[in-house]
Image: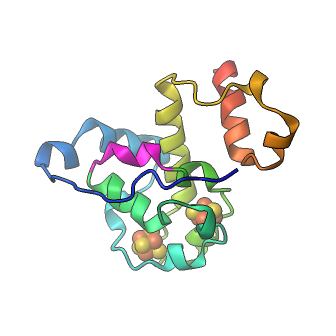
Amino acid sequence: MVIKPVIARMNLILSRQRVNGEFVRKVVELSGENIYACYQCGKCSSACPFVDKMDLLPSQVIRLVQFGDERVLNSGTIWVCSACFTCRAGCPKGIDIANINEALRLIHLRKNIDHVKLNKLKRTDLAGFPQIALISCLRKYSS
Ligand code: SF4
Ligand code: SF4
């Protein structure tokens, strides 16, 4: 499966409402992570073994969350993350990006938009399908 960059150029207007908004509050609540501790050192992005399959670096995902930019929900990165915890091991602030990505997937799934029709997937498609995406698709039917 080829993951297309969905956020090629990001024009962002910062506002107090957005930075302190419901989206950021939800990510913090669901992930349990202190997203504000991240100071963008980039160690997570340089350590992530799946970064070449991502359209946003793990550190960029956190940055967009800090800014309250919900376009991060359209990023393929949150589905590619395999929760390997490599980034957490190297993060000087002890931030677990896997938890943040999981929170973003949950927020995305709770919107109940069907991007993947499981019954329409061919075996050949499944071979390149990220495991975590498949689990999330199935979880939708059990929650
Ligand atoms: S390693 Fe930690 S502090 Fe550095 S950019 Fe990644 S999440 Fe932020
Ligand atoms: S937990 Fe996710 S973001 Fe972190 S290194 Fe592993 S794949 Fe990359």
- Would you say 58 lies left or right of 38 here? right
In this picture the colour scheme is rainbow
Is 26 situated left or right of 58 in this image? left
Q: Quadrant of ligand 1?
A: bottom left
Q: Please report the residue visible at 23 percent of the width from the left and 56 percent of the height from the top.
A: 11
Residue in the image at 32% along x and 39% along y: 23
Q: Give yes or no for residue 72 being in the magenta stretch.
A: yes
Give how far across and how far down residue 111 sits, in percent. 46, 25
Height in image: 40 above or below 25? below
Q: Quadrant of residue 10?
A: bottom left
Specify start and end residues of the magenta stretch as a single range: 68-75
Is any part of residue 138 visible from this angle? yes
Q: Quadrant of the C terminus?
A: top right
User: What is the chief secondary structure element of the magenta stretch?
Assistant: helix
132 over 86 or under it: above or below: above
In-front residue for pair 99/137: 137
Work out whether residue 93 can be spotted: no
Q: Would residue 93 be found to the left or right of residue 14 on screen? A: right
| Residue at x 46%, y 34% (from the top left corner) | 107
Q: Is residue 84 magenta?
A: no
